[in-house]
Amino acid sequence: MSTTTGLRVVVTGATGNVGTSVVRALSDDSRIASVLGLARRTPGLRLSRTEWAAVDLAAEDATADLTRHFEDADAVVHLAWRFQPTHDPGTTWQSNVLGSLRVFDAVAAARVPALVHASSVGAYAPGPKSPPGVDESWPTHGVPGAAYCREKAYLERVLDAFEERHPQVRVVRMRPGFLFKESSASEQRRIFAGRFVPGPLIRPSLVPVVPDIEGLRFQVLHTHDAARAYLLAVLLDARGAFNLTADPVIDAHVLGELLDARVVRVPKGPVHAALAAAWAMRLVPASPQLFDAVLRLPLMDSSRAREELDWRPEHTSVEALQEFLRGLREGSGEDTAPLAGHRAH
C-alpha cells in the first residue's frame, strides 16, 4: 500500500493486555490508515480508524477466515494467546500453537509483507540472572516443563521454518519481559492468582512479608511501552528478534520497597510444594511449573531494540508495577471480554 494513504494493519488477540495497547498505538499514528482487531469476542471498545471482527484461532476452519481478513494488509501483528486452562495443556496448545500455525499460513496465503509475532522471555532457555542479560542469540528452547514456555519455544522453531519457506515476508519476533498496566490488573489477577485472591487485598498495608527466593529476579515492562515497539516494528524495515525490557530488575528487595513489606529469605522447595498443592486443588490457576520457569528464565539485554528501533521505555519497571497494583485495588479494566474489571473506565 502506498505510504501516501497509510498502512493497513491486522492485529490478532486485539482485546487483551497487549492487544488493546497495540491497537491504540496503531490507531493514534497518522501513518496507519486502518486497523482491524481480531478476537474471539468483539469488544464494545471504540477507537479511531479501528474495526473489529470475531475469529477463534482454535477453530479448524479459521485459516480461511484469517486469509480473508488479511487480504491487502501491510502487516499482521500476532498477539493472540490463551493462558488457561493450565490443567488442560491440550486446549492451550490448540489455541496457541495450532492457532498460530493458522495465522502464519494465512499470512503466506494472503501475501502479507510483514508479520510481527509476540514471542516472550518465556521462549528462552534458562540463563544468567545478572545484568546485562542475554541478547537475542541466546537459545530459545524454553523451560520444557511449563506449557507457556514450551509453546513459545515451539513457535520460534515454526517461524524459523516459515522464514526459510517465505523469505519475502519480513518477520519480527518481540521478546518482552512481563507486561503490566493498570487496566490489565483484573485480567491478570484472574489468570495467575485466581478468584480467591481479591485485588483490594494486595496493598502495602496488608502484605507484611515478601519472600526472597533463589532465582526470583525478573524484568517488567509497561504494556504501553511494548506497544510502541510493536508500532515501530510495523513502520520500520526491521527483521528478527528484539528483547524488550525496562529498569530496574525486579527482585524481592524491590518488591519489598514497593509494598512496604519485610523481605524474608525462603527456600524455593516449600514454596513450590505449597503452590503445587494449591494448583492440584484448583485454588490457584498458575502452575508450579510456571513458577519454576520464572526462577530459571534469564535476564535480557534490550540494546538491539534501542539501537535499531530507536526505542526507549517511557516508564520504569517500578512505575509499571505501581500502575498494576493500583488497578488491582480499584478493579480496573476496559470494555473488552478479557480486560473486564469491577468498574468501567
Image (cartoon, rainbow, N blue to C red):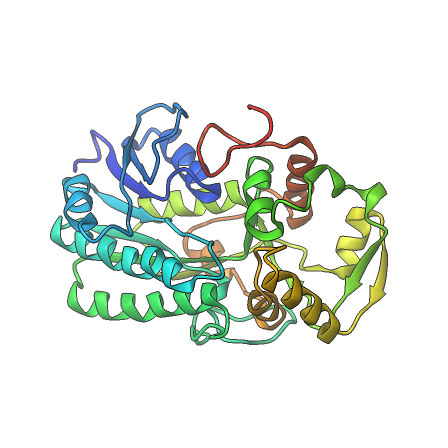
On the question of residue 239 being in view, the answer is no
Residue 197 shown left or right of residue 286 in the figure: right
Residue 36 shown left or right of residue 145 in the figure: left
The quarter holding residue 283 reads bottom right
The quarter holding residue 71 reads top left
**Where in the figure is residue 228, as x and y percent of width and height?**
45, 42
Residue in the foreground of this view, choosing between 338 and 52: 338
Residue 92 shown left or right of residue 165 in the figure: right
Decide: is 9 above or below 178: above
Q: Residue furthest front?
A: 281
Residue in the foreground of this view, choosing between 339 and 168: 339
Check the picture and name the quadrant holding the N terminus. Answer: top left
Check the picture and name the quadrant holding the C terminus. Answer: top right
Decide: is 243 above or below 71: below
On the question of residue 178 being in view, the answer is yes
Residue 304 shown left or right of residue 61 in the figure: right
Residue in the foreground of this view, choosing between 133 and 267: 267
**Where in the figure is residue 69, as x and y percent of width and height?**
19, 39
The quarter holding residue 222 reads top right
**Where in the figure is residue 91, as x and y percent of width and height?**
37, 58
**Where in the figure is residue 266, as x and y percent of width and height?**
80, 70
Decide: is 316 above or below 249: above
Residue occupying the point 49% across, 65% down: 122
How many numbered circles does the render carry? 0
